[in-house]
Amino acid sequence: MQVKLLAFAQARDQLGWPERMVDCEPGETPRAILARVLPGARLETWRVAVDEEYHSWDGPIGNAREIALIPPVSGG
């Protein structure tokens, strides 16, 4: 199946693209997908959302259509 990866703000700047389609399996986790697609990416400070809901980096994506990479947000 194909999933759309979305990158926002600093994530988009660091990765060099706002969205990308990737092949993956329902049992894969966001961490495994990103390790395959973006070897060496530093994910420690990013959050991940699957189908518009925050998700664990280590939970399977199931039949997701979209994975969003969300960098740290600062406010004031």
Image: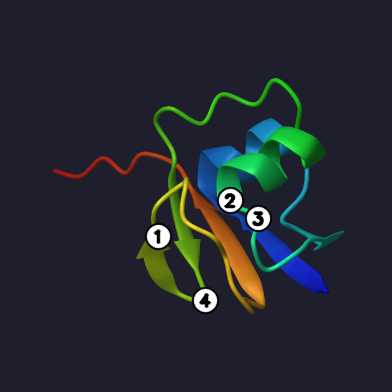
x%, y% of residue 66? 63, 71
Give whichever of discs 2 and 4 has the lower sequence position.
2
Task: Give the number of the mark in front: 4 or 3.
Answer: 3
Instruction: Out of 25 and 74, give the one closest to the viewer.
Output: 25
Residue at horizontal 52 percent and vertical 76 percent from the top:
51
Labels 1 and 2 touching (C-beta < 8 A): yes
Determine the residue positioned at 39% across, 31% down. 45
Label 4, residues with CA under 10 Å away: few <14, some 14-19, many ≥20: some
Residue at image mark 3: 28
* Distance Cα–Cα, label 4 vs label 3: 15 Å
Label 3 amino acid? Glu
The amino acid on which the numbered mark 2 sits, given as a three-letter code, is: Pro
Q: Residue 39: x percent and y percent?
A: 76, 26
List the residue tagged with mark 1.
55
Q: Around disc 3, counting alpha carbons within 10 Å, would you say few (fewer than 14), some (14 to 19), or many (20 or more)?
A: some
Picture layout, residue 64 above or below residue 46: below
Amino acid type at circle 4 is Asp
Q: Which residue shows up at 46% across the image and 62% down it?
A: 49
Left-right relation of 62 to 74: right
- Amino acid under disc 1: His
> SS at mark 1?
strand
Inter-mark Cα distance, 2 to 3: 7 Å
Task: Find disc 2 in the rendering and name its residue.
Answer: 30
